[in-house]
Image (cartoon, rainbow, N blue to C red):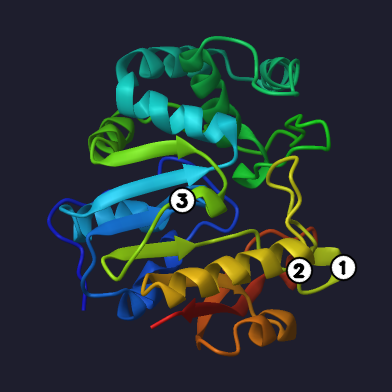
Amino acid sequence: MLQVQSTHYRPFLKWAGGKSKLIEQYIPYFPQSFTNYYEPFLGGGAVFFYFCGAKPDANKFISDINPELINTYSCIKNNVEPLITLLKTHQLQHNRDYYYQIRSSASAIARSHWEGSEIERAARFIYLNKTCFNGLYRENSKGQFNVPMGKYKNPTICNADLLHSVSVALQCATVSLKPYDEINPKNEQDFVYFDPPYYPLSSTSNFTTYSRYVFKEAEQIKLRNTFVKLANWGVKVILSNSDCAFIRELYADFNIYEILASRAINSQAEKRGKITELLITSY
């Protein structure tokens, strides 16, 4: 079984659906041997950071379709010191009016990228992530970040020690802006972890819009087809998703395991709690 080595890395973002609390349940299903690791739905990157400690010699390829997320990872990798300086400024100025001023500037140009330099955009992204409701990343159809401010008394906007640690971890990774079907694993030396937006368990739990690009039934089927293609090449593939009949049927030809998770985001407190999710492996 893989174990975390002496160097332990962890995510720097709050992320809906993040896997930090599920890693211990995942470990028994991770492959023992691989040379290249791919995580194309990066988000908070909990599994990537786990492997930075558990498999430091593996080549790591991380990617996402969210340009602001990838820009932030790239800036931490290459320009962490000026990023920390800007985050300290955000920390000092944070209040309700300031939050909505920054959120408005983040939405000013939504067609491609937010305004500002790469480092300014990364600092803004982290600031909003640390101060918005539940660390929820959500865009409307125009690509505008539209999450209200969270109810935090003293949010930690700039954790310099953590950002330095993340920068070290990212030195061994190739960070790319690309969709999952453009990654390039080829054989049994490659391991891919897919963590897509989950298929909704009901109409009221339909949250698939982490970006302006939706991820619904047709996209789930397309992802399954990619999973099958990679598995046929001998690539080791793992996918996490919601525990429902649709996903179980899609992956009926593979190994399906139940994982106990907590549902933290729901407008009704009584509907938060433990649920099962699925972990699906090709091997």
Percent across and percent down for residue 178 are: 53, 41
- Residue closest to the eye, 276 or 142: 142
The alpha-carbon separation of the residues under discs 1 and 2 comes to: 7 Å
Is 82 displayed left or right of 114 in the figure?
left
Q: Residue at x 25, y 37 (%)?
A: 165
Q: Which amino acid does the dot numbered 3 rest on? A: Ile
Q: Which amino acid does the dot numbered 2 rest on? A: Pro
Marking on residue 200: 2
Q: Which amino acid does the dot numbered 1 rest on? A: Ser
The mark total stands at: 3
Q: Give the mark, 3 or 1, whose residue is nearer the N terminus.
A: 3
CB-based contact (under 8 Å), mark 1 and mark 2:
yes
**Can you say which quadrant of the picture contains the N terminus?**
bottom left
Marking on residue 183: 3
Percent across and percent down for residue 55 are: 20, 59
Q: In the displayed image of the protein, which residue is found farthest to the left? A: 6
Residue 144 in view in this figure:
yes
Task: Determine the secondary structure under disc 3.
Answer: loop
Residue 94 falls in which quadrant of the image? top right
Local crowd at mark 1 within 10 Å, few (<14), some, or many (≥20)? few
Percent across and percent down for residue 135 are: 60, 43
Local crowd at mark 3 within 10 Å, few (<14), some, or many (≥20)? some
The alpha-carbon separation of the residues under discs 3 and 2 comes to: 26 Å
Marking on residue 189: none
Percent across and percent down for residue 255 are: 48, 88
Task: Determine the secondary structure under disc 2.
Answer: loop
The alpha-carbon separation of the residues under discs 3 and 1 comes to: 31 Å
Kindly report which numbered mark, 3 or 1, lies closer to the viewer in this rendering: 3
CB-based contact (under 8 Å), mark 3 and mark 1:
no
Q: Residue at x 70, y 70 (%)?
A: 221
Disc 1 marks which residue? 203
